[in-house]
Amino acid sequence: MKILVYTDVHGNKYALEKLQDSRDYKTADARVFLGDAVMMCPFPNECLRKIWKSGDIFLLGNHDSYCAFGLPEEEFAYFKADKKAHQNYMREKTLLEYKEKLATMPKDCYMDFLGKRFYFTHYAWETDRLVMDDPDDPNAPTVKTAELFKNIKADYIIFGHNHKPSEFECDGKKFICVGSLGMKHPGNYVVINIDEKGINVERKKIFFDVEKLKNDIITENYPRAQGYCKFFEQD
């Protein structure tokens, strides 16, 4: 059994196209998208269309939720004016039928293999909306992150939201942050191989035309465009 997991595409159709053209993607027995198809990069409709057409399991991300339902009032305090403007811009750009479909997407799912339970989600929805933003370090989740998932009964907890991949173990559970496909270069994804030998989790990279993407972002010049280009200059 081969399961491919990706997350945080964020409107980057170039990274998504490269992933969908890859051998890993085409030979996977199951594919799980952990959410955040939209916002940040300029192709929300294209990315939503491609993921839904693929038949991949689609789990809701926080930005997908903002797109479907708008920003909840209690979250306004966390968003600067230009970030709110960006959300509104991309929400207006997204087709109404896609926003309506996003509103029906599940937030998580379980799978069982070799007596082990896998839990897939974008982040810990039951807790504060800032789940992974800074339990202590968003790029190196630890026991504080594990605490957010304390009610989840699973051996493997696989999530997104943090754009930098990481993993750790706590109380017999393995926590795997997949890392962003669309807001890092190269993009990140994970392949889980399950056979008679056991369970093996491989971290993978995908390369795409990042300069073309940045040019598209700057050309459209929507709110926060300059700031989002800087994501591709970070480690």
Image: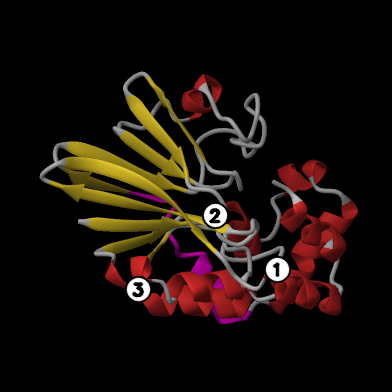
Q: Nearer the viewer, mark 3 or mark 1?
A: 1
Residue 48 horizontal/vertical position (percent): 53, 74
Amino acid of disc 1: Cys
Name the residue type under label 3.
Gly
User: Which residue bears the numbered disc 2?
Assistant: 61
Q: CA distance from mark 3 to mark 1?
A: 22 Å
Kindly identify which residue carries mark 3: 55
Q: Could you tell which of marks 3 and 1 lies nearer the N-terminus?
A: 1
- Image: 95 above or below 105: below
In magenta stretch: residue 227: no
**Foreground label between 2 and 1:** 1
Vertical arrangement, residue 147 with respect to residue 32, above or below: above
- Kindly identify which numbered label has been placed on residue 41: 1
- For this rendering, which residue is in front, 165 or 144? 165
Q: Assign a secondary structure to mark 2.
A: loop
Quote the CA–CA distance across marks 2 and 3: 17 Å
Residue 226, horizontal then vertical, whole percent: 86, 62
Q: Position of residue 136 (x, y in %)?
A: 65, 24
Residue visible at 72% across and 63% down in the picture = 40
Quadrant into which the N terminus falls? bottom left
Q: Amino acid at mark 2?
A: Gly
Which residues are drawn in magenta? 95-109
The disc, 2 or 3, on the residue closer to the chain's N-terminal end is 3
Q: Is residue 110 left or right of residue 206?
A: left
Residues packed near mark 1 inside 10 Å, few (<14), some (14 to 19) or many (20 plus): many
- Image mark for residue 203: none
The residue depicted at 36 percent of the width and 68 percent of the height is 25
Q: How is the image coloured?
A: secondary structure
On the question of residue 56 being in view, the answer is no
Is 131 drawn above or below residue 204 in the view shown? Answer: above
